[in-house]
Image (cartoon, grey):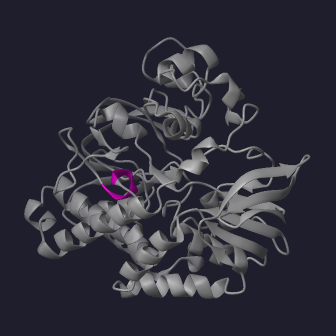
Amino acid sequence: MTRKRPPADVTVVGAGPAGLTAAAAAAERGKRVLLLDQTARPGGQIWRHRDEATLPTVALAALARARAAGVYFVDNAPVIDVLSPTELVVDFRGRIDRLETATVVLATGARERFLPFPGWTLPGVTGVGGLQALLKGGADIVNARVVIAGTGPLLFAVASTVAKAGARLVVVAEQAPGPDVARFARRALTDLGRLASAMRFRAAFLGTSYRTDSWVTRADGDTQLRSVTLRSNKGEEVLACDWAAVSAGLIPVVDVAQLLGCTLHGGAVAVDHAQRTTISNVWAAGECTGIGGDAAARVEGEIAGRAAAGDHAGAADARLVRGRDAGRAFASRLAETFAPRRELLTLADDATIVCRCEDVTRGALCPEWSQRQAKLWTRVGMGACQGAVCGPACSAMFGWELNSSRPPLGAPTTGAWLQGLGGPG
């Protein structure tokens, strides 16, 4: 992909499976396509890499297709504000600029959901996907004792990565009830591709116990993690470990969509049969529309890319529609099977930090408050991450609304954000 920034007919935000596919589909239809990503390489979290030789065949094919189509890729370029559906504000490596575009495709992906528990801020405690990202970034965990506890198919992929990295995998704990997981697995038997992937992942950590109905209730240590307490229907067990990868699944990233004014449904971007959002000239695809995996994301990206390029007949291709519908059905089963259990919502005690940016503890928060009241009285959700971590946690624990997005999105941006828009510096 040529690293150059022309005026864009289609701007795709996010270079994961959905974004790469959408960008290629639009470019193949003669559109000038700009693909933005806030990281250094295309591929998203699922295909995060340092060396393309390590990528799976499907990822290499997606990259090759985008390059051949003439997609313009710009790395380290997060969208930090929206002036209109056709005018984005982008941080191009510290240079803030307005980007005009005819249409936008959102492919902003997902992030991990964390539900606080005592000790979750200790060094050595990460998210499930977070540990995988560290390993792909070069972290060394050879001979380290690792506990993985979370929910959903991501556990298998990360456990496989951890085992191959030379760690001593202690246990893989799934919080969902055993019968629900078994029912989900039986449905998966009809999808040979997913079945083959699951078997390949499981083979990599075959010597490690995989337990359902099990979750971490606390982490202990001094300046470093030393052990976690694992609860199951058989009671509690203390497991010595050096790393604990713990999270409560994935949630859509919708901050840019919120700034655009897109309607959300169940925390995800609402789209129609052609992946259109409720805002004119804005489409969305992939995990930001619901957690369904990379295969579903690629199909949605293909539909969105074709539609954004004006090829509505191509977007309505029967094969794509069937694939999209199957992906949505799979996403629905995922959400139902692996929803966080009630016990996870009450693990935090009064001393447990809920908002890590502002050091707000569970004891400082009142469930009867609204999200706005909590912000005003404790600053929860007002730190550098803008509630990306504590917002979903508070929503799950207390039923509060999700944080609304406010510019500048992402990490704190210098005064150049205002200066670039002609405001006070």
Q: Residue 287 lies in magenta, yes or no?
A: yes
Farthest residue toward the left?
313
Residue at x 68%, y 40% (from the top left corner): 348
Farthest residue toward the right?
222
Query: Quarter of the image holding residue 128?
Result: bottom right
x and y percentages locating residue 120 in the rendered image: 73, 47
Farthest residue toward the front?
234
In the image, 29: left or right of 98?
A: left
The relative height of residue 201 versus residue 77 in the rendered view (above or below) is below
The relative height of residue 125 versus residue 327 in the rendered view (above or below) is above
x and y percentages locating residue 386 in the rendered image: 55, 31
Q: Quadrant of the C terminus?
A: top right
x and y percentages locating residue 175 in the rendered image: 58, 62
Q: Tell me how many marks there are.
A: 0
167 or 15: which is nearer to us? 167
Query: Quarter of the image holding residue 317?
Result: bottom left
In the image, 37: left or right of 203?
A: left
In the image, 355: left or right of 15?
A: right
Q: Residue 402 lies in magenta, yes or no?
A: no
Q: Quadrant of the N terminus?
A: bottom left
The relative height of residue 251 versus residue 293 in the rendered view (above or below) is above
Residue at x 26%, y 46% (from the top left corner): 270
x and y percentages locating residue 101 in the rendered image: 27, 41
Does residue 20 show up? no
Magenta-highlighted residues:
285-289
Secondary structure mostly taken by the magenta-highlighted segment of the chain: helix
50 or 271: which is nearer to us? 271
348 or 307: which is nearer to us? 348
Residue at x 59%, y 78% (from the top left corner): 54
Does residue 274 show up? yes
